[in-house]
Image (cartoon, grey):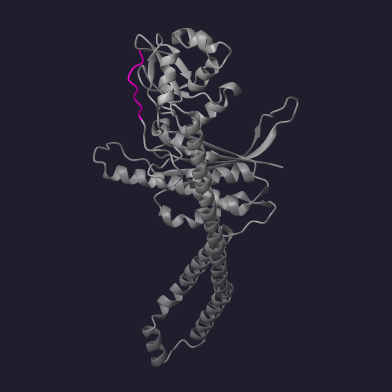
Amino acid sequence: MVQEFRSEISPPLLSAGSDRDLNLESTLQELQLYNFQVETSCTGVEVGKAFEKYPLLPGAILVEQGKYAGMISRRRLLEFLIRPYGQELFFNQALSILYSYARTSILVVPETTPILTAMQLTLRRSPELVAEPLVVQTAYNTYQLLDVQQLNIASWQIRGIETQVRYERSQAQMIQNDKMASLGRLVDGIAHEILDPVSFIWGNLTYVSNYSQDLLKLIAAYEKKLPVLSEEIVSLKEEMEFDFLEQDLSRTLASIRTGTERLKKMVISLQNFCHIDEVYPKPADLHACINNILLLINSRIKGEIEIIKNYGNLPPVYCFIGQLHQVFMNILSQSIDFLLDEAVRQHFNSDFINKPKKPQIQITTAVVSQPATTPHAPDSRWVSIRITDNGPGMPQELQKKIIESFSVEKRANKETSLAVSYRIITARHGGKFNLISKVGLGTEFEILLPLL
């Protein structure tokens, strides 16, 4: 006999804004599933009556001695009954006989399957099976049915949500890009305004230094010709501490020159960082680019991190230099964060017995060769920039998340600074972006840029 019909129905699937909201990660267990099981010994007429009583049922789960045996859909049963002499042949026969004729490929998926994945699996079936319901396994030896039409509606709803989310994020990204471009132009203008007076100071320091030396020589010549000075002059020299002034004046001018030179370099580095790239790439000095970023982030290092430069002989590289400034800033900031966090952890960890190692970042550049992808072709030449730190390294879970963020799907959800760097290197420059990290040893970011 037919088992008592049970339908496990969640709230009806409505359009966006209903009381049940789907999201990009929704699974089949969030849809309405039908639990209708019949023994294979039941007849077609009994199942037909159940279908007539419950018109929304997509089919029936077949069980034999309590174990799953298969599935027969409403459409498949109707096809057999409308055949010539179909009712006489199958209507009063056991379902096991009818199912032996109607046996087809049944799609069985777990309830944790994402809706979009289930939709892809459904579309891969043969055309004659596209309308067949899915069998969803909810537990061990427990199966329920999902109407493919409901799956289609849920899939379209999620696709609509995904499209809306992508649109909103693209709009937000456009606004953010416009804001950053405006900010870059503003900072570039301010840097230019700062650079002008700094250049005046820098240009006149040489003259001030020469003038002061000439005045000191003139005073020395007067003292040599007039060995006996008046009491007024002697008192004035003592009041102004002339001997100390004479010794300290050159040191003061040298200090002003050093500070002005440093300020000038920082302003130029800031201008380079805010540089807006042109439509086409131009040759650039990558070492100067890296040095500019190191100068800008020097305040974060504060002498706690040692920077080691192993620069090779690099030719000018055709690139979008403004975007490479952003890449180097992102990578170096990431390494600095890891090193500083580890330094703080070691400082407050009373169980740390060994002497903590000096935080260190090595920047190595070289021209390398890569094997050709096609036979008999010459090896390709690349510029390699490796940024290595001796920090704690990344666990496998974090590395997996970072690498996943490089994909288009994950970037649509959340775009990280490393994902932006990956896109700039691979999409904009045709290069390669590699990440190697070992727990306890450190992390290495490698950038490969093709040489034209």
Q: Residue at x 51, y 80 (%)?
A: 216
Q: Residue at x 69, y 29 (%)?
A: 372
Q: Is residue 5 magenta?
A: yes
The image quadrant where one finds the N terminus is top left
Q: Residue at x 52, y 57 (%)?
A: 176
State whether residue 365 is above or below residue 148. Answer: below
The image quadrant where one finds the C terminus is top right
State whether residue 30 is above or below residue 343. Answer: above
Instruction: Describe residue 405's horizontal placement relative to residue 352 as left or right.
Output: right
- Extreme-left residue of the structure: 350
Compare residues 419 and 19 and report the one nearer the observer. 19
Instruction: Describe residue 242's horizontal placement relative to residue 354 as left or right.
Output: right
State whether residue 267 is above or below residue 284. Answer: below
Q: Position of residue 197 (x, y in %)?
A: 55, 74
Q: Is residue 366 magenta?
A: no
Residue 242 appears in the rendering: yes
Compare residues 120 and 168 and report the one nearer the observer. 120
Q: Position of residue 7 (x, y in %)?
A: 36, 27
The image quadrant of residue 247 is bottom left
Query: Most prominent secondary structure in the magenta stretch?
Result: loop
The image quadrant of residue 246 is bottom left
Compare residues 299 and 251 and report the one nearer the observer. 299
Q: Position of residue 4 (x, y in %)?
A: 32, 20
Compare residues 91 and 299 and report the one nearer the observer. 91
Residue 440 appears in the rendering: no
Image: magenta residue range: 1-8
